[in-house]
Structure formats: structure tokens, C-alpha cells
Amino acid sequence: MRLALLIALLCNRWKTALSYGNGNQLMIKQWSFPGGIALEGHKQVTEISEPTLPPELIYPLLQRSDNYAQPIVGPGQRVLKGQIIATPQSPFATPIHAASSGIVKAIASRIIAHPSGLEDTCIIIETDGMDEANPLTPCLDYKLETPDELRNKVAQAGIVGLGGAAFPTAEKLATGQSIHTLVINGAECEPYISCDASLMQAHAEQVIQGALIIQYILQAKRCMIAIENTPPAVRQALLEAASRQGIQIATVPAIYPTGGEKQLINVLTGQKIPANALPSEHGIVCQNVGTAYAVYQAICLGLVLIERIITVTGAGIKQAKNIRARIGTPIKHLIEQCNGYNPNVQRLIMGGPMMGIALSTDDIAVTKTTNCLLAMTTSELVQSQAPMPCIRCGDCASVCPVEILPQQLYWYSRSRQLEQCQDHQLFDCIECGCCDIVCPSHIPLVQFFRSAKGELIIKDQQSTQTSLAKKRYQNQQQRRAKEAQDKQAKAEKRQAAINKMKAAAAAKRKNSI
């Protein structure tokens, strides 16, 4: 079962088809990224369903990493659809908007989408069914505004990268670099996920317009939209929408993880971005198609990011759908919109089978980064087997897309040789799971790597805190030494003045005699 998803290892080279808006197709030079695997798609590009309004909406204040938003509403307060309910506390967070009108029920701890099943502070809104919205301020012609003005609108709309990273889009567009190529990523390489394909098929015109707006903000000379070579209807819709717009539609192989930012850039341009570098440093910016659509809505319609397309699928779901879901909707409400679970459902995953996280409950709310809800049955799950000793076959290294040595990292992380892990580029690992799939010994390699990363991060934080404490102590000692010197200098100055006065008095007495 462990290799049931694996069809073939990635070829050394492949061909990428490039089409223009007028329908002419060329074959560009063959490029590939190292490693990768071909997986069964299990995709259903369905029409986008519109769910009913949930009775409550839940908004975690934790955005990404340790970046929080600050609530600006309180319990009992009525809010409108599109109203800001929390503001960012750093450039790496975005405003949170209410997805419908209602009353703030509480600001309290709820379980959030986290690998450890943690609770964190959330804003809970009880919807009133009226869906009353703030007035909209659309832009009639985005080219009449400056790129900085458009970036500010993107920031105020709360738009983040909808491919999963949740990095604020406005920050990514403020590169400070000269950008020559914009890549719009529509390559959903992970199995089961088809929300982007459904979006492109249903809203190709809006995706193209969003791409053009981003291209204008970046002042990029070239724009490419990359899609997998499996959905012909999606490609046709984009070709028709891109007609006379000068945007190139590139068809790339469905090889996992082609959808990774640096892997996709490598496929399309032949340029390999170093692990410790950003694509913008090399003149390239990559954005998800969902992000492009959200930018179109923010600029041309005045809409903030309060909804996104989510794939709800898996054999554990009675009716798989792509749903236009409100941000903050509890997962159980979306499951109900798909007629519920099948009796043999075993696991609920947020995300895909390769990089998603298992959830302990469906009371958790969807966030801006939720692209898929996957309910899996026993037949779909890889049978859990006890790990066996590593046989040093090297299969993990052959499929690694970032060309690290998972086998060696495994030994170092297992023995807690953290410095050696760093020396072997542990943080270059993108946790794609390719090594886990092909390992004949069933070793949970990514689990070891995540654990080692966590320990190194904690160690680095402790080292930083120790350095700060040492610096504060040194500063305190220097301040005390300076105070002592100043005090001594003042005492000496005062004593010198006293001695001078005494000498003057003695001289006066002597002269008077």
C-alpha cells in the first residue's frame, strides 16, 4: 500500500508546452528539477458549489509562524461583512475581516489547524443571516493608480499567498528588486486537490485580469501561467481568456512537487534558485492563481479576502465538491454541504495527502491557507507499519527535489547531532514527503526532520535570549562602571574645589599676618 500512489520516478528531462493567447503552441527547451515522483491524481474538477451560511465563524488570531493579529472588536459588538475585526502586529501578518454580518460572540480559546492540535485565541462571530456588507470601493481602471497605491489596497484586503504559505501578498510584491518575469502557479501537483483547476475553469477571465494587475504592480515584462498537462478544459478556458493579453500559458508535467515555487521556476525558466535565496533576487516572482483571483476582486470589485475555493474530497466523503467557502467556516459545516461522511472514514486531513496535517476534530475553522479537506478511508491510507532499519538503498536521495541527503540527515536527526543536521542543509528540506513514500523501510523521515528543525529553532531562540541577556548584563556593567567613574570624577572635582578654597583661605590668612 505504501507504494500504491507511486507510478514512476521522475525522468531526467521532460518537455514543457508553451501556448500563447492566440492559440499558437511552441515547444520550449526541456528543463527539469531533480527528483520528484509521479502520483495518481485522484482529482475531480467539479463546478464550484455555493454553501449555506454557517451559524458561526471562527478566526484564529495566529496568522503564520508567531505573527498574531490584534482584535479591534469586543464581545457583543455587531460587525458587517468585510469589516476589519483584527489588525496585524507585524508586516508578516494581514488584517482579518468578518466574512458575514453578525455579533461577536466571544474572544476565546478554540482548537486551531495545527499539527499538534493546539488551542489558541480566536474571534467567534455568531452570524445573523442578513449578510449585510460594508460599502465597496472598486477601482475602475487600475492603470490610473500607482503600483504603491495598488499594493496598499492588496494589503488592506488581507490577501496572502493562497497556495499554502500565507505570506502577505503586498509584502511579496514590494520586492525592491527589478522583476522581469511573473509566474502564476496553477500547477496543483499534490493528489486530490483541484480547487485551483476549478477556479481557473470557472473564472479564467478574472484570473487573467488579476495576473495583469500583479504584472503592472511589479512592472514585469513577462507573465506566464503554469498549469498541469492533465486538465484540457482548464487550459482551453485560460487560452481563450488570455487572447490578445500577451500572457503565456505553460503546460507542465504532473510531477510532484512541480507546484513548489522554486521547482516550478526551474521547470519554466531553467533557472535554479539557491535554497537560501528568494526568486525576486533573480528577477522572478511567483504567485498562486487563487491569489491572482483575490487581487482582481480586491482591485476591480473592492472585495476583501473573506472566501476561497476549497476542495472537499476523499473516499470518506459522500459527495466530493469544490466549495466557495467563507473564511472562518467550521469544517463540519462544509462536510454537511457534501452530504456528510461515509461510514468507513478514518482520517480527516487539512491539505493534501503529502503535506497536509491530520485533524483531531471537524470543529476547526478553515483559514486563508485551507485549500483542501481530505477525508480518507482505510483503503486510501498507507498502512502503518513499524519502521525497519535503514538499508541505505539511496531511494530517498534519488527523489529529493532539493538534492539533500535524507538518509544522512535521518541518522544525524535520530542521534540528535543537530549541528551535523545544519551542516547537511536540514533547513533546505521543503518537507514534501517524497522520501517517505519511497522508503522501503517505512521510516517516517519527514517526521524526524521536523523534530530536528523544531529543536534547532528552540536552541537558536534560547541562544538569542542568552545573547540578549549577556548583552543586557554587559550594558548594565558598563553603565554602572560609567556611573562609578562619573561619581569618582565629581568627587575628585569637588575635593579639588575644596582644596583650592582651603589654599586660598590659608593664603589670605598668611597675607593678613
Image (cartoon, helix red, strand yellow):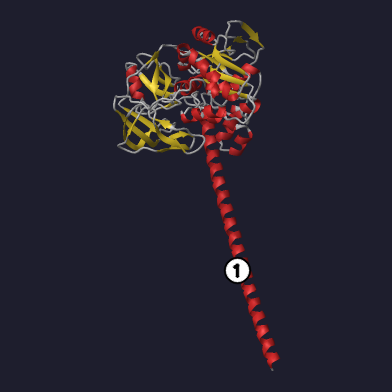
Residue 360 percent location from the top left of the image: 38, 29
From the viewer's side, name the closer residue of 342 and 121.
121
In the depicted view, which residue is nearer to us: 75 or 354?
A: 75
State how many labels appear.
Answer: 1
Crowding at mark 1 (Cα within 10 Å: few <14, some 14-19, many 20+): few
Check the image and report above or below for 128 versus 30: below
Where does residue 9 sit, x and y in percent of width and height?
Answer: 58, 15
Q: Residue at x 47, y 26 (%)?
A: 386
Q: In which quarter of the image is residue 431?
A: top right
Q: In this view, does 34 lie above or below 414?
A: above
Q: In which quarter of the image is residue 489?
A: bottom right
The kind of secondary structure element at disc 1 is helix
Pick the quarter of the image with the C terminus. Answer: bottom right
- Quadrant of residue 182 within the rendered picture: top right
Which residue sits furthest bottom?
513
**Of the pair 380 and 1, the residue shown nearer to us:** 380
Can the viewer see residue 438 in this picture?
A: no
Q: Is 302 situated left or right of 407 in this image?
A: left
Residue 283 in the image, given as x and y percentages of width and height: 64, 25
Report whether 107 appears left or right of 286: left
Q: Can residue 228 be seen in this view?
A: yes
Amino acid carrying label 1: it is: Lys
Q: In this view, does 492 lie above or below 223?
A: below
Which residue is painted at 66% across and 12% down in the image? 30
* Left or right: 22, with 1 as reference point: right
In this rendering, would 174 be left or right of 504? Answer: left
Residue holding disc 1: 487
Tell me residue 418's x, y (percent): 58, 38
